[in-house]
Image (tube, rainbow, N blue to C red):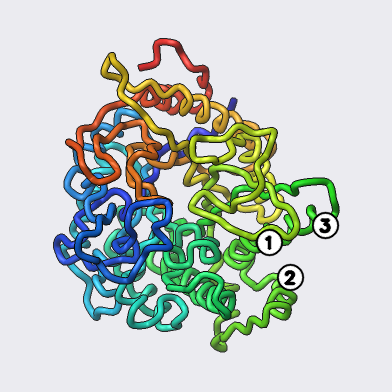
Amino acid sequence: MSFPKNFLWGGAIAANQAEGAYNVAGKGLSVADVLPVGADRFERVSLAVESGQYYPSHTAIDFYHTYKADLKILAGLGMKCFRTSIAWSRIFPNGDESEPNEEGLKFYDALFDEMHRYGMEPIVTISHFETPLYLVKKYGGWKSRSLINFYVKYCEVIFRRYQNKVKYWLTFNEINHAHTLPLLAAGIYLDRDAPGNLQAIYQASHHMLVASAKAVLLGHKINRAFKIGCMLSLSPIYAASCRPADIFSAYELRRRSLFYSDIQLQGEYPAYFSRIAKEHNISIQMDRDDQTILQQGVCDYLGFSYYRSSLHEQGMKILGNTGGLLGKRNPYLKESKWGWPIDPLGLRYVCNELTDRYHKPLFIVENGLGMTDEIAADGKIHDRERMEYLKAHVASMADALADGCELMGYTWWGPIDIVSAGTGEMKKRYGFVYVDKDNAGNGSGRRLKKDSFSYYQQIIASNGKEIEIKNDTE
């Protein structure tokens, strides 16, 4: 086990899943603020806040008001970094204003200062499923080229404001989820399976890719020390059999995600997209300078989320959620309570795949296990299953490093319990710190360390060398 001395061990959250305070100090509505709770939340969404409906993002875990106390607790882990997002609508409430909201800017000043107080490097996602709702309703979201300028203006404000506080940036969270979660990832409201959806998705994606490249160019101009990455959901896709048709179909499906990182890291549309466009009647509208911007604005590193692998058979309907693409059940893998296959070897596989393809630094910015944690009779939470999951994935990272992969860091998803992006639940918990709230938003909000807290503390203190789980872990 050998991790680099400067390896960034940390944790990751998103503003819309943690902050709450959805209408405080001038914040506007985002797409996350109109998502109800439930596994069918994307089928029941409307572009308005409806009376009598519970919206988890409105209060979340109230991190907006509790961040000082929460960071003090999390500092006990010894984390080297902390990934969060800036809520775009906290800075530009509608997204198209001429001037930013100073109260929103002050909040992130204070938040980043508090991180630095505990020695945590901020890892900041610029747009994490938080497109201002007004931009969706007035402009049609990222289908409109107008959003490029709104986004770049937003980037300029935060780059200049926090240039001495933030070094690591991510342009869009899981940008490839434009296919499976178009409202969250691309701010576009589509009727499922309606004609023209794929055209809309790729056009919106093009605008986001150009915006990402412009952000990279702008960020490097403002501060050459900035490290600006792209971020994708990149769980592996295995063929369901050795049948050649299954293998090639899985390969083609994988390309649907790698399309985004190919452009963001290699600076041009990949050759295989020509056939995709022809077969699906896709015509991307580009400005004259777009290709030059994409070539010049390549990202410095690749951040990605990894939760599970999927098993694909030719002809399957392609579905996905916040954990990645769904597929057939893999008989060789155990599953979590939510049916997500647990595949630590898949993490090593992906690290090697991406290293071979891009020769760029990698940052595992999301990985974790959702569980239904219960407080035991002794008043503690014994979450050994989470520790076993963490142990296996840290070991897999060590193998990837030995394979020659360049890994910058690892941020466990949800070091403190937050609202689930996929379902809006609190019951699906990832944290090392328990938050007393239920799916309806009820509870005291009390924080309680789980057994896994001291285990991750042990891993970080040893820089990944001590991963054995001790029986007295508390």
Q: Earlier in the sequence, mark 1 or mark 3?
A: 3
- Binning the other alpha carbons within 10 Å of mark 3 as few (below 14), some (14 to 19) or many (20 upward) gives some
- Cβ–Cβ under 8 Å for marks 2 and 3: no
Residue pointed to by mark 1: 255
Q: Nearer the viewer, residue 292 or 469?
A: 469
Badge 2 amino acid: Tyr
Identify the element where label 1 is drawn.
Answer: helix
Side (left or right) of 31 relative to 102: right
Q: CA distance from mark 1 to mark 3?
A: 15 Å
User: Which dot, 1 or 3, sits closer to the camera?
Assistant: 3
Residue pointed to by mark 3: 245
User: Which dot, 2 or 3, sits closer to the camera?
Assistant: 3
Q: CA distance from mark 2 to mark 3?
A: 18 Å
Q: Position of residue 154 (x, y in %)?
A: 33, 71
Badge 1 amino acid: Arg
Residue 282, numbered label: none
Q: Is residue 122 visible?
A: no
Residue positioned 33% across, 82% down in the render: 138
Q: Nearer the viewer, residue 221 or 67?
A: 67
- Cβ–Cβ under 8 Å for marks 2 and 1: yes
Identify the element where label 2 is drawn.
Answer: loop
Q: Position of residue 294 (x, y in %)?
A: 57, 74
Q: Position of residue 53 (x, y in %)?
A: 24, 59
Badge 3 amino acid: Ala
Indicate the quadrant where residue 36 lies. Answer: bottom left
Side (left or right) of 97 relative to 234: left
Q: Is residue 18 above or below residue 181?
A: above
Residue 272, numbered label: 2
- Binning the other alpha carbons within 10 Å of mark 2 as few (below 14), some (14 to 19) or many (20 upward) gives few
Side (left or right) of 161 relative to 78: left
Q: Earlier in the sequence, mark 2 or mark 3?
A: 3
